[in-house]
Amino acid sequence: MRLYQLHSKQTLPISKERAWEFLIDPKNLKVITPKAMGFNILSGGEVPLFPGQIIQYTVSPFPGYTTKWVTEITHIKEGEYFVDEQRFGPYALWHHKHFLTEVPGGVEMEDIIDYKLPLRFLGQMAHPILVKRPLQKIFDYRREKLNSLFGECKNHIPFLEFKSF
């Protein structure tokens, strides 16, 4: 069994409060997701995030394939972090932690996603092309979109790293 981890950091020139307000509105996930992903919230996105919230949506990770994805918001510390976990969807495991930290000149947004693919060896073989590359593109898009919405911190270098265990 191989576990993977995506670790991303981005600094924005806004207050922690403003970043938090944006992140806890489920509708904003569509704003920071590439249109080609076909992301649509089916239910659970009408109110700001709360522990126990179930959000159902559809996503098209690649052309010709659409899947339903169900996540639960499992933990929230107001203004600091929240965690979403897949309950049903394309991954064998998906555990996504979102952190906000005040830094000089703004707020650092940090994501740590631990995930496991289905299909054992086949999933591992598919990872570089069908999973890692699209996740890289999603987070590149997200970084650019957030910069266009809130501005860019010129003195902070974004960070994106993949690991496997």
Image: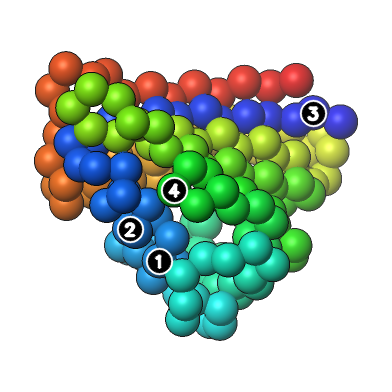
Mark 2 to mark 1 CA distance (whole Å):
6 Å
Q: Amino acid at mark 1?
A: Asp
| Residue 132 as seen in the image, left or right of residue 100 | right
**What secondary structure is found at the residue carrying circle 4?**
loop
Instruction: Say if residue 95 shows up in the picture.
Output: yes
Residue on which the image places disc 4: 79
Mark 3 to mark 1 CA distance (whole Å):
32 Å
| Mark 4 or mark 2: whose residue is earlier in sequence | 2
Residue on which the image places disc 3: 2
**Tag nearer the camera, 3 or 2:** 2
Mark 4 to mark 2 CA distance (whole Å):
11 Å
Q: Amino acid at mark 4?
A: Gly
**Tag nearer the camera, 4 or 3:** 4
**What secondary structure is found at the residue carrying circle 1?**
loop
| Mark 4 or mark 1: whose residue is earlier in sequence | 1
Residue on which the image places disc 2: 22
Identify the residue shown where x is 23% and y is 22%.
Answer: 104
| Residue 122 as seen in the image, left or right of residue 135 | right
**Tag nearer the camera, 4 or 2:** 4
Which of the two residues, 134 or 158, is positioned nearer the viewer here? 158
Mark 4 to mark 1 CA distance (whole Å):
13 Å
Identify the residue shown where x is 60% and y is 74%.
Answer: 56
| Mark 4 or mark 3: whose residue is earlier in sequence | 3
Which disc, if any, is residue 25? 1
**Tag nearer the camera, 4 or 1:** 4
**What secondary structure is found at the residue carrying circle 2?**
helix
Identify the residue shown where x is 50% and y is 52%.
Answer: 78
